[in-house]
Amino acid sequence: MITTYKAAPDIDVLTSSFPIPGFGLVPINAFVLHGPEPVLVDTGAVVERDEFMTVLRSVIDPADLRWIWLTHTDFDHIGTLPQLLDENPEVRIITTFLGVGILSLTAPLPMDRVYLLNPGERIVVGDRTLTAFKPPAFDNPSTTGFHDDKSGALFSSDCFGALLQAVPENAADLSDDELRHGQVFWATVDSPWLHKVDTAAFARDLDGIRAIEPTMILSSHLPAASGSMMDRLLASLEAVPSAPPFVAPDQAALEQMLTEMTAGAGQ
Ligand SMILES: [Fe+2]
Ligand SMILES: [Fe+2]
């Protein structure tokens, strides 16, 4: 089920909790930035595209959108992209050359609807200037997040996501343990290459994020977080390279899960 809440007076969050059997829940967030040139950040999961359109209409008329910031091309981010392009001839997609390339394998973007923005570059959309950055953790090479100068919020894509047992609307409602464990676990699943990084270089990357001093951190996979939580969020990421690597369930584990489910169903 997709619900909404406000991260700021002019920022709506559309959120859904996606279950990972045996592990917990991952929030999947999209964001609407209201203003003279409204922006939708990501477009929901493919499996929830009909519901996403209904819920989106409850916070904005999709015909009013002027921009879609596509943080990357994964299935939990591109759900309603084709429909939004069809319904609204005005809307343009902010993405990268790689984003266009990856989508050309499934649903090619019309090139006159695309705006290519690389990390470090910025775009003015109405009363906001959005500056693209490469998050320190990501699972897809097309990924860009951005900083919005109006709200001060940092949109971090998959970075700072967490696997949770319950999903509040404010990351401050998570215990220290749940936040840290959930973030570290998510990062080992989503960015397993972090186990191979040069930790000194990674620490410098994290310092660069800290220096942005955002008012909020709006991750695709974490409840909205105040900027005051930045040190905690970064400390969790810093622990990832030396954390135990994620080992996925194998066939024996799957068969055991299925047996338990069958036994449970018979009770
Ligand atoms: Fe992703
Ligand atoms: Fe994602």
Image: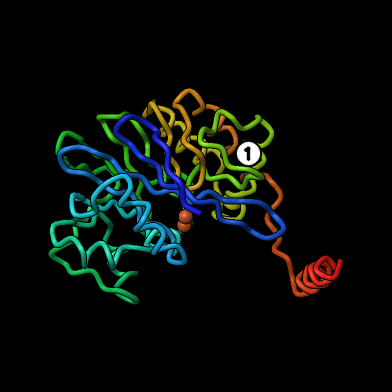
For mark 1, give the secondary structure. Answer: loop
Q: Is residue 145 left or right of residue 68?
A: right
Q: Position of residue 3 (x, y in %)?
A: 46, 47
Which residue is at 85% across, 70% downward? 266
Q: Nearer the viewer, residue 66 or 243?
A: 66
Q: Nearer the viewer, residue 267 or 191?
A: 267
Name the residue tied to disc 1.
239
Q: Nearer the viewer, residue 148 or 255?
A: 255
Q: Position of residue 207 (x, y in %)?
A: 45, 31
Q: How packed is label 1: few (under 14 Cα within 10 Å), some, or many (20 or more)?
A: some
Which residue is at 68% across, 45% downward? 243
Q: Quadrant of residue 191?
A: bottom right
Residue type at numbered disc 1: Ala
Q: Farthest residue in the top direction?
A: 228
Above or below, 238 relative to 24: above
Which residue is at 42% across, 38% downward? 5
Quadrant of the drawing holding the C terminus: bottom right
Q: Position of residue 224 (x, y in %)?
A: 46, 35
Q: Position of residue 16 (x, y in %)?
A: 50, 51
